[in-house]
Image: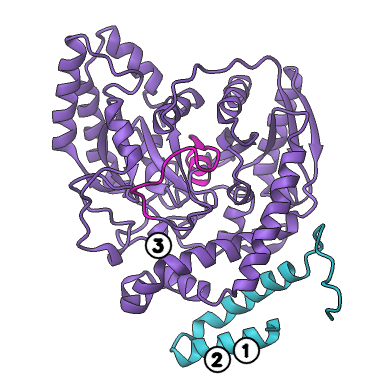
Chain colours: A cyan, B purple
């Protein structure tokens, strides 16, 4: 799942459940998730054949 | 504030017949009567049981049975640990009606060693916060300025020791919850190596990040408590000369001006007394908070899944929001966070090669005002929660032992903390280094 798709789904779910105040928190968590996914760690070369 | 009686001094006075455990316990309970209305450090005071226990321990000592350094010592316990016959509230209405059938393992050890439990202390609800602002029992307050937070989540515990309402206390630390309040209240707090002290009978926040440990007035007192809680019987190791390493970059980028001054003054004083001090960066420090968020959130979401569905209204609104947010963490990102955690553990291990301990401030800011959402540093506003976790959470991810000790005060008298980090499995050696640093700075 892409982060943009996950953020959209999470915000929609929070609003459906009557928790619109979660929106800025979800966006902040998404920033942290982006940093994790972009991490340049040893041994994290792309899987052969992957895009 | 006057300096409270230490566990070490209590032990000497008790055995020299200068006072009894019953007298000191009575003094501590009177101090609770005086100070707790102002500080809200205790959720439950166990006065009658404490007086009875103290009298029994005095009789034991008179008859020749000496249980050791904690014999007759009045301590408090974070209300996250089970104490048989009392509710474990975790400072939450969610836990209403709970009654502990048995002592948590650390409580059993403390009792067996002769410690007297005077009460259970306030905390940030379910330990899910760094200020103690959100508690079903209202916020605990800082003894140095009651308008300010004592830090969290073991805020009531730290306040109880700093205000002389206990000689030591048992806390827990998932992202800094022993070290943060120790720094904010001007006392010592030790997070041992991960897994050294049992959490059986404690309400979890994140089972892979949670640590139990002691807080007390001095490094020596903290070590005495740690020995009992960990079931150890070691002699304090000697330290000859100090070889320390300051963590730079991320760890010094965002500090309140006075916190930075006190930290730099401590470095200067240690160097002047012969310590060898160099510095080092942690390459992936920018990933500490992302990794910590995903792991602690994932773990907390799993633990709270049933109750957040059944009784969401019983949580304080900010803690409920945090748990609801935590439920959106994806499994793939949780796994990535675990991979980052391993990389960080290797980097901290490497940073410790060739020195006794890493050194950094404990808190980037002095104790914040209760309810304050953000703090300005260098012209920019930063969320209080993120700032307070910034320098401690790494060592919950990696499991290295870490200790906070006092490092001077701001111009308004608020304590600053200095943090030392040791090698995994070498908590005793870290405490020995901390004792030497404490001696040099006092």
Q: Is residue B381 visible?
A: no
Q: In the figure, residue B420 lies in which quadrant?
A: top right
Query: Do the residues at discs 1 and 2 belong to one chain?
Result: yes
Q: Chain of mark 2?
A: A
Q: Chain of mark 1?
A: A
Query: Do the residues at discs 3 and 2 belong to one chain?
Result: no
Which residue is disc 3 drawn over? B134
| Quadrant, the N terminus of chain B | top left
How far from the left and from the top, in percent, is residue A19?
46, 85
Badge 2: few (under 14), some or many (20 or more) residues near its Cα, within 10 Å?
some
The secondary structure type at the circle numbered 1 is helix
How far from the left and from the top, in percent, is residue B135?
36, 60
Residue segment shown in magenta: B180-203
Q: In the figure, residue B111 lies in which quadrant?
A: top left
Mark nearer the viewer, 3 or 1: 1
Nearer to me, B329 or A14: B329
Nearer to me, B289 or B405: B289
Which residue is disc 2 drawn over? A12
Badge 1: few (under 14), some or many (20 or more) residues near its Cα, within 10 Å?
some
Callouts 3 and 2 close, C-beta under 8 Å: no
Q: Is residue B291 left or right of residue B163?
A: right
Which residue is disc 1 drawn over? A8
Mark 3 → mark 2, Cα distance in angstroms: 27 Å
B334 w.r.t. B70: above or below: below
How far from the left and from the top, in percent, is residue B268?
74, 27
The structure residue drawn at horizontal position 37% and vertical position 69%, both measured from the top left corner, is: B316
Q: Chain of mark 3?
A: B
Q: Is residue B166 left or right of residue B29?
A: right
Callouts 1 and 2 close, C-beta under 8 Å: yes
């Amino acid at each position: 799942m892409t982060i943009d798709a996950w953020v959209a789904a999470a915000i929609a779910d929070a609003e459906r459940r009557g928790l619109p105040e979660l929106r800025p928190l979800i966006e902040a968590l998404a920033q942290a998730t982006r940093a994790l996914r972009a991490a340049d760690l040893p041994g994290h070369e792309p899987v052969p054949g992957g895009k | 504030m006057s300096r409270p009686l230490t566990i070490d001094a209590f032990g000497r006075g008790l055995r020299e017949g200068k006072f009894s455990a019953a007298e000191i316990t009575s003094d501590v309970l009177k101090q609770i009567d005086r100070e707790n209305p102002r500080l809200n450090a205790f959720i439950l005071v166990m006065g009658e049981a404490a007086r009875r226990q103290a009298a029994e321990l005095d009789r034991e000592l008179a008859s020749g049975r000496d249980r050791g350094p904690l014999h007759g010592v009045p301590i408090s316990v974070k209300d996250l640990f089970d104490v048989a016959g009392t509710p474990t509230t975790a400072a939450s209405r969610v836990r209403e009606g709970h009654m502990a059938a048995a002592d948590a393992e650390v409580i059993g050890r403390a009792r067996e060693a002769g410690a007297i439990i005077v009460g259970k202390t306030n905390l940030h609800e379910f330990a899910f916060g760094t200020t103690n602002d959100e508690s079903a029992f209202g916020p605990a307050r800082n003894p140095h300025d009651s308008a300010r937070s004592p830090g969290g989540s073991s805020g009531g515990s730290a306040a109880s020791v700093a205000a002389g309402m206990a000689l030591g206390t048992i806390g827990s630390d998932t992202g800094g919850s022993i070290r943060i309040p120790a720094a904010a209240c001007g006392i010592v707090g030790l997070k041992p190596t991960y897994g050294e002290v049992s959490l059986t009978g404690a309400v979890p926040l994140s089972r892979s990040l949670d640590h139990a440990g002691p807080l007390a007035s001095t490094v020596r007192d903290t070590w005495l408590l740690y020995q009992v809680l960990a079931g150890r019987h070691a002699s304090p190791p000697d330290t000859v000369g100090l070889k320390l390493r300051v963590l730079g970059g991320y760890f010094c980028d965002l500090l309140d001006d006075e916190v930075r001054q006190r930290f730099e003054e401590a470095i200067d004083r240690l160097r002047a007394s012969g310590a060898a001090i160099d510095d080092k960066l942690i390459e992936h420090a920018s990933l500490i908070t992302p990794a910590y968020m995903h792991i602690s959130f994932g773990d907390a979401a799993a633990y709270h899944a049933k109750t957040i569905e059944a009784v969401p209204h019983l949580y304080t609104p900010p803690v409920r929001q945090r748990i609801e947010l935590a439920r959106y963490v994806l499994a793939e990102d949780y796994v990535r966070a675990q991979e980052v955690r391993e990389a960080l553990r290797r980097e901290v291990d490497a940073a410790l090669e060739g020195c006794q301990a890493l050194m950094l401030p404990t808190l980037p800011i002095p104790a914040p005002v209760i309810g304050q959402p953000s703090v300005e540093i260098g012209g920019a506003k930063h969320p209080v929660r993120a700032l307070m976790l910034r320098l401690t959470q790494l060592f919950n991810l990696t499991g290295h032992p870490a200790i906070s000790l006092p490092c001077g005060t701001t111009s308004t008298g608020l304590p600053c903390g200095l943090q030392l980090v040791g090698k995994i499995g070498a908590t005793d050696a870290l405490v020995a280094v901390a004792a030497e640093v404490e001696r040099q700075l006092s």
